[in-house]
Structure formats: C-alpha cells, structure tokens
Image: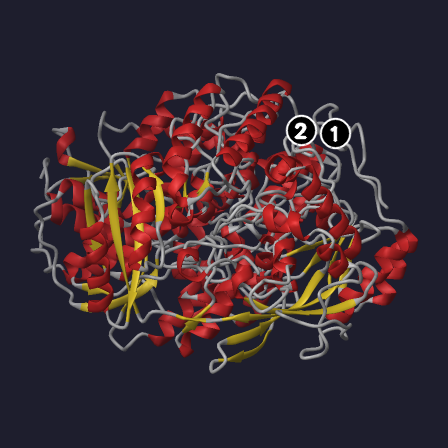
Amino acid sequence: MAEQHRPHTGPPAGPSATASRAPTASRAPAASSAFVAALRSAVRGASDFGPAARALTTMDASNYRRVPLGVLAPRDADDIAAALTVCQEYGVPVVPRGGGTSIAGQATGTGLVLDLTRHLRTILDLDPAARTAVVQPGVILDDLRAAAAPHGLTFGPDPSTHSRCTLGGMIGNNSCGAHSVAWGTTADNVRALSVVRYGGEALRLEQGSGTGPAGVGARGAGASHGPPGVSELVASHLALLRTGYPDLPRRISGYALDALLPEHPGGPDPVRAFCGSEGTLGVVTEATVRLVEAPRARALAVLGYADESAAAEAAPGLLPYGPLTVEGMAADLVREPAGLLPRGAAWLFVETGGATEAEARAHAERVLRAADAVDGAVVTDPAGQRALWRIREDAAGTATRMPDEGGTSHGSAAGRGGEAWPGWEDCAVPPARLGAYLRDFRALLAEHGLRGTPYGHFGDGCIHVRIDFDLITEAGVARFRRFSEETADLVVAHGGSLSGEHGDGQARAELLPRMYGDELVALFGRFKDLWDPDGGLNPGMLARPDRLDTNLRFAVLPKRPVDVEFGYPQDGGDFAGAVRRCVGVAKCRTEEASGAGVMCPSFRATGEEAHSTRGRARLLHEMLAGEVITDGWRSTEVRDALDLCLSCKGCRSDCPVGVDMATYKAEFLHHHYQGRLRPAAHYAMGRLPQWLRLARPFARPLNALARLRPLAALAKRLAGIAGIAPERTIPVLATQTYSRWLRERQGKGTRILSSDRVVHLWADTFTEHLSPQVGRAAVRVLEEATGRTVLPPPRGVCCGLTYVSTGQLDAARRVMRRTLDRLGLFPGQPLVVLEPSCAATLRTDLPELLPDDPRAAELASAVRTFAQYVEEYAPDWRPPRLDRPAVGQTHCHQHAVLGDAAERRLRERLGLTGELSGGCCGLAGNFGFEKGHWEVSAACAEERLLPAVREAEPGTELLADGFSCRTQLDQLAGRRARHLAEVIAEALPEPVPGAGAPGPGR
C-alpha cells in the first residue's frame, strides 16, 4: 500500500519572484510506472497522474488534505471493477469522489481518486408509477430533481450543495438536508445498490434481500447482505447492536449495523447499512432511489425568536403540524439586512406544502399561530422564498468569515482574519434537547475562547457550525483537539450523535468510542474487514481512522507572508490567507448560472475542475505548499488553469466566502512573467490604451484599410501574430474621440463657478476611442437631468484595467499614480464612470494596488455608475417613458463589484421591462480576443445571453453597458446593443438650436 505523505514543514514554496523552482522538504509519493501501465491497459476511462490532477484533488470542503497518486475518470461499472482489481494487485488505496464537497475529509485520499462525475452521470430509468429512479453515482442531485419534476416528484434529501453534490456522495455520507423532517435521510430513500468491492467483486444490495453475487451493473439479479461473514457477525452480537445506538432521526455516525438486525422492518437492510460508509466498504456503480411527491405549492413561515435557544426549544412543538422543514439560524449568520426577516435575534424557517398556494399559505399560517414567536411572517412569493433560502444555503461558506474579519497573521490571537472552519460541523441531539445543548455548547465555546455561528436543522436536532479554530499554530491545533474531545463528550451527554449529516470522516471518527464505546467500535472494524480485508478503500476513515489533528491542509502553507503586489485588505495583506478563503463548498461548480449570478463561466463552458474557482484556488494552495506543484510562481499548471479564467470577478460576489480569482490571476501573471517575455496578447491587448492613443491620428485610413478585403486579410495575420484570435473582427476606431468632442462642444469660454454645478465624467479607453457615442449620450442625459455641466476630462488618465487583467502590475501602478496626479476631483465630488469594468477597477484594484496612497481610497469611494449618479443627484428628474421590453447583459463587474440596483430602478422608471441576463457574455475584455479563447468565449455567450436575444420579440430594446458585452453581441449575434445612456438620450426632446450646454459659464 502506498505510503502516506508527511506534511511539508520546510521553507515557503517559492512564490518568490526570483526562484524558478520552489524548495520543499518532502515530496508526495508518485505512482509506479508498472501500476500506471497496468491501470491504463485495464480501463477505458482517462487517468491522470500529473501534478495538476493530483493538486486538484488533495482537498474536499474539510480541513484536511491528502495527496493522491492520480485520478481516474471511469467510463462505466466495468472500468470501476477493473480499476479496483489493479489497485488491489498493486496495493494502491482508492477513494471514490463525487462533487468533492464532503466536510469531514472523506473525499480525500493518498491513492487513486475515482472521479465519478465525468462519465457516470446518467439517469438510467425513472418510473413515475413506482416512484423510483435508477441512477449512476455521478448524477447531480438537481439533475435528478429536474427529471422528476415533470411527474410531480422529487428526491427528498436536499443538502445545501444540491446544485453540485452527487447521488453517490450522498449515499456515501448518508446526506440529509433541510427537508429531512418530512422525507428523511438518503438511507431512507435508497432501495437497492450495485457496488464493487476492492479487488473488483460486484455485489447487489437490496432491502430485505437474500444472498448471492451479481454481475457488474446488473439490476434485478440475486442480492446479498454483503460479503460472507456479515450475517454471522450480526448474529453473534445481537445484544450489543440492539442497545448500542442512540435513537435519533439524524444518527449518521459510524456504520449502521443495527439495520442488519433480524427484527428490522422488512428484514435485514444491507442498503441502509451501506449508506453512510464513506467509501470504505465498496464503490457504488448504480442506485435505485425512492422519489416522493413534491407539493405543488409551498409557503414559508418565518418565525423570529429572542435567541437561538428559544428557537431551538420551539422547534419540536412545530413537528406535529407536518412541516416540510424546520430550519434555524441566529442573527450572527446574517451578513446584510434581509428585509423579509421579522423581528428577532434568531429565526425558524418552517416550510409548508399544499395542492394550491392558498392551501400552503393556510398551513403556514396555522404554524405561525401555533408558534410562540416574537414576530413572524408568511412568505408565498417564490422570489422572496429564494432570497431567504439563499441566506441559509450559503451559510456553509458565509459562516467561514466572522463579521469582524480583519488581518490574518497565521493564527495569532490578534488576527485570524475572522476565519472559521468546519471540524465540529454537524452533530445532532434529540430535538427536545437542542435548546439545552446549544446553551452548553455556547458556554464551551466561550470557555475555550472560540467563536462560532450555529445554524441548521433544528427540527431534527442537527446543528452546523463553523468555529474560528487556529489550525496553523501548534497551540491552536492543540486547542482544536481539546475542544473536539470535550464537545464530543457534551454531545454524548445530551444523547446525541457526533455526526448528524456529513459523516465522521477524519474529523470525528477518532472520537467514535466516546459515543459508541470500544466494543461497538471494534465491531465496526470487523465489519470493515469483512468488506475490505486489504484495507484499500478510503483508509483512515471510520474504521481505524487517522487522528483528527493530522493531515490538516494549512500545515503545508508558508509560515511567513508571501511577497505580493495587491494589498489583500480583507486578508491582512496575506496571499496565503486569501487563498485559504476557498473552503471547497463548490458553488462555482454549478452547471447553470442562477438568476443574476455569474460564477463560474469557464467551468460551465468546460466542465473541468481546473477551470472552476475552487480548482484554481486548490492549485494556488498547492503552489504555495510546493509539494505537488514545485515551481512556485513559474508553475505551468497554475498558468494553464488560470488561462481560461475570464477575470469576470463573479466569484468576488457569488462565492460565499468572496474568493476573488481575478485578483489572484493578475497577481500570478505578474510574478509568472516577471523578467520574462510575455505572450503577444499581453503586449497587444494589455497595453491597449497606448496603442489606441498612437492610432488616433490615423483612425480614418486604418478603418478604410480594414474594409478592403486583401488588407483585411493581412490585418488578420498581423493580429494573429499579436495573439488575437483569428475569429475576431477588430473594432472600428473613432474618428473623433469623446474628449475631443466634449472640448470642442464646450468651447473656450466655459468658466467653472461652483463645484456643485459640474459633473466629472470619466473618459475610459473604450468610450474615448471605440464608442464615443456613449459618452456623448451620457453628457446629454446628465446635463438634462441635473442642470450641471459635464467637464472635459483631464488628458492622460487611465484606470489601468488592461494592465491589471494581464498581470502587468508595475505598469498598472504607474498609470494609476499618474491618474491620481492629474485627475483633480473637487473634494467630495463623485466621478461618473460609464464602463463597468473601469468603474470596478477604480473601486477595487486601485486601492488594493496602492494601499498606502490615501488618494486611491478617496477616488474609489467617489466612483458612481451612470444610473447611480442620476439616482443620487437627480432624484426628482422624470426620465422619458419608453414602455417596451428589454433584454441584454448585466456586466460581470457591475454585478460583482458595483451592484445594479440603481440600474434596475432606472429601467423601471423608463418603462423598460424584463430582466437582463446573468452569467457572462464571454468576451470579458481582453479574454475573448486572445488566441485560444474563442470556443470558451462563444460558449459563455451561448449559455444565456445569445438565447435571450434570439428569443426576444421585435421592438425589444437590447441593452449592454459594457463595451465587451456590446462587442460580443455585435460579433456573435449581429445585433447592436446600446448603453442605457444612449437609449435615454435618443428619447429626450431635441435641444433648442444654439442653446449650448446648460450650467454655469453659459
């Protein structure tokens, strides 16, 4: 069996601008060539033993990290059996992996990772009459629910990761979710399993089954209780199995051997005994699951209480009303005011169902009347319900950042950066004991000087919590162990289970003797040995587990801050702290953008983990560790993964913990190419403002030449040399720039009498040289709406966007400093920026690249979008009514950094109806123009934007405030989109000839 790696404790792993190879104290073991050859000859699925594949699977959503030998994506059950045969022959451990969202470490391993999400994701059968479905292990839960929905059915268990977790992973962990009070755990909803043991033997498990082997993937063949000896093991320990388990709705810890008791309803249930085994007994190749009837209508009773204990004590009294959920959370989980929440410091979310909305509402109102709550409300509006549930579902991420987050100093008392981690994540106690348990738990936190934010499934007595453990220093890790041991004793004292949903993994399995006693835990080991005598399946989990304070993923990170360019103010200037933000909940792995969401367009285009926000964060983590990825900032693995990052900044807002991969990418590119030749596109697109200024005097001849076919072909070839995609058309240059037009319009007689009579309108590169009509329109609207004069912009200012996005950070700082020197805003005056990407750069990148210059923060706070300025400075202005539908794109940076609430309100005042697309247009500044990005760029546009435009009715207004979005629509759809300012300006009455611009000096 492969030797487990030892955590690296040597010097920092080379994120040094000078070293080309990072020093490391150890190397993770590599797979032998004989094993690799044998595996590849036995299976049809692709295997990868390279550094990137290994780095991507070192971690799940837990505190733990184990380095695998490689990754296999089996194509079918035969591939799984063949792989397990070869692995047994060579003594290589195996860990099956679904979405990688496990919170206790059970989706990490030191041997071969089976990626079951690549190919094994087919719903083989769905029988509405029998209310069953047959699925492969890689089926995403939401895909199953979507397939069942037309029949009025659903799969009951629904963890908060429902958009990316797999059925195989749910079976492995016996997942539950918010609706378990109505529909139970995964084990309650699985009817039959086809599994493969280590060594390749296939078994069929069915409820109340007899014995006998079954062929791989076969359905309806003879079924078994499991391997030989299991029935005898149970028969010889009946008394222990009958008395050793607490009676709980959420008892997930350990093996469910009591399901094999002869008095179990329907006879011994090997399926239930297998569920929750965390990949330690066999690999699921197929599952028959039960579907339940989904209510046609739902209502949500939101009940406010004085504190979480009061909410917890009220929860059991609501169960007789037959709710679908009884979820609880306290005020310290709510980061921003939520208008739908009633008064209180803690809340219960009680969902009810019905055949009609009226029936569901009446049910919820009965709950509201019965609840002894401080305040309450019933929400039937689907959008309102989604907004409330989003707070709860994002909790696994948001709870990892405490409200007063600040700097991080590697676990020092002064600055863990508000970081909070799993580790004591999801215990469960009898619901009637939950209030008392929470009081004792809060007291224990205080005793250890720790903070946490409990929330969870109050109706089932199950609590989730992230705690601000210091998992970096030796003293902090020791406190983590002491707290875990004492909390385990507290849970047991309240009659509870160490795990109530996510399984034991490495986080809690060591503590199982405190819950079950040594004799029953020893029986777990014997059960494991009957299934897996070689110990090859997910070793270190459940039976003979690794210690809970080993394999911690933070141990390999540099002990000193890495020298970086950005300020990382939310992480105390520590790049490792920024990378640590990713806790692995994988919201970035969803295959459809929801609502206005953006993250993560490249993953949705490719389906590759390396192109998800989480995947890139994992690669950066391993780059810092220097154990698997050994070249530090020079890493080609990290470079290649970041290459398809669109720098859309969607993760900055959509990731529950605010990972900002666009910033990390710019940081990496700066170091990666420091002192080296860059890709041609960095010089062409990254220095676009320079080239456009140089080309300005020649705009007319350049545009004319580009229209001549032979010269256009030559221009294409030259563009290709410059790294520009051959599929792209070079935009037309403006023959008169925006700023020149405005200066000529204003004339020489303009005098500024008062700072409150002028508007500062930023002349971004795109408005200035490529779409000056947007600037002209904005000037007209702003002067009409406010009665103020728009000032001509100072010469030579630039936000530095293109330099930042290509990682030319030294140049970006020079440009930004020059801008600060020349801009000359009046104190307290806002700066209107028409291009969302430039506004976002000024709002975030500017102060983060120049953290020591107070002018940078002042300018950042002055930035307003066009709609924000109109709303703030012309609140009584009545814009023209347009009264027509609109489609188009909300710019990614607008969504992520600036927000679009003012734009929505302005569109409503104009009578423009309909929603703009979320997701990403796919052009994303320089990204879509760079060679090699065309397919991904087009795929992003095809996800939401282009279909919305094609489906729009004639006369629909096509809106896009971003130049990239307008360009993408022009080049891919042949449609001209307009900035909102253009649309408004067109509808304004014609100005009186000779009146000139309004405002002082005229």
User: From the viewer's perspective, is 928 left or right of 334?
Assistant: right
Q: Residue 886: x and y, percent?
A: 26, 66
Q: Which residue is identified by label 2?
A: 555
Q: Residues within 10 Å of mark 1 (few under 14, many from 20)?
A: many
- Quick one: SS at disc 1? loop
For marks 2 and 1, give the CA distance: 7 Å
Splitting the image into 4 quarters, where does residue 704 fall? Answer: bottom left
824 or 317: nearer the eye?
317
Q: Amino acid at mark 1?
A: His
**What label does residue 305 carry, if any?**
none
- Evaluate whether residue 899 shows in this view: no
678 or 990: nearer the eye?
678
410 or 540: nearer the eye?
540
Give above or below for 890 relative to 220. Answer: above
Which residue is located at x 30 percent, y 49 percent?
Answer: 317
Q: Residue 551: x and y, percent?
A: 69, 34
User: From the viewer's perspective, is 32 left or right of 13?
Assistant: right
The quarter in which the C terminus is drawn is top left
Q: Residue 1000: x and y, percent?
A: 9, 36
Contact (Cβ within 8 Å) of mark 2 with mark 1 = yes
Splitting the image into 4 quarters, where does residue 714 fall? Answer: bottom right
Give above or below for 838 relative to 89. Answer: above
Q: Residue 501: x and y, percent?
A: 52, 49
Which residue is located at x 60 percent, y 57 percent?
Answer: 169
Q: Which residue is identified by label 1?
A: 8
